[in-house]
Amino acid sequence: MTIAVLRLGHRPARDKRVTTHVALTARAFGADAVLVSTKDAGLERGLRSVTAKFGGPFEVRTGVPWREVVRTWKGAIVHLTMYGEPMEDVLPRIPTDADLLIVVGAEKVPRAVFDLATFNVSVGNQPHSEVAALAVFLDRLLQGAGLRRAFRGRLRVVPSKRGKNVETFES
Ligand code: SAM
């Protein structure tokens, strides 16, 4: 199953940090790609640099026509929203043999997204954050396997009790 995260409503000046965190969380918790509805070359550069250093594969595309992506997506679409059905009820119904698109918003999400999504899914029914919702959803979906995924980059963190231990590999 390929998992892509679609970030809607990114405003480069305002949302750079949160959208970067959405993308880093997507990568670290098991997604294969992030698609951002607004073009942002700086965001792409930053994320590609992280992937070059810490490993991939992880695809980053900005300026994607989100309506077309959603309409032509072959597989299930999960829209994360505090108004949706509880995550625990939806998880068993998500097909595991097809690609999955996970949609997260920034500000107000267009009504069409609620209509076009296969599942509107809430991670609790309180307002919080797209980063938190994405992390918890991916972790429950993949039952921790996303976090355990091996990345092959120039740098590899060696877990240690204290301090920072990082191995460097020649490319
Ligand atoms: N007020 C906005 C709206 O009505 O769509 C939501 C803004 S919220 C800061 C940004 C994004 O975080 C949402 O679009 C949604 O993807 C995610 N989010 C926030 N709380 C959530 C929750 N309880 N469950 C699932 N997703 C949530």
Image (cartoon, rainbow, N blue to C red):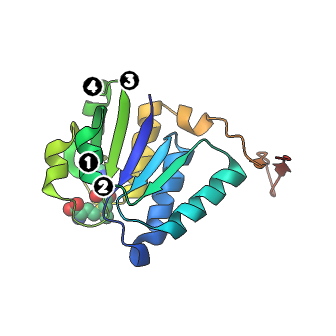
Q: Check disc 2 and report the residue beneath it.
A: 65
Query: Which label's residue is closer to the chain start, 2 or 4?
Result: 2
Q: Is residue 167 above or below residue 21?
A: above
Residue 68 is labelled as: 1
Q: Name the side, left or right, on which 53 lies relative to 118.
A: right
Q: Point out residue 63 in the picture as x, y percentages from the top left corner.
A: 38, 60
- Whether tag 1 and tag 2 are in contact, CB under 8 A, the answer is yes
Label 3 or label 4, whichever lies nearer to me, is 3
Q: Point out the image quarter for the N terminus.
A: top left
Q: Name the side, left or right, on which 93 lies relative to 22.
A: left
* Residue in the image at 53% along x and 34% along y: 144
Mark 3, secondary structure of its residue: loop
Q: Check disc 3 and report the residue beneath it.
A: 96
Query: Which label's residue is closer to the chain start, 2 or 3?
Result: 2
Q: CA distance from mark 3 to mark 1?
A: 23 Å
Q: Check disc 4 and report the residue beneath it.
A: 93
Q: Point out residue 120 in the picture as x, y percentages from the top left corner.
A: 22, 43
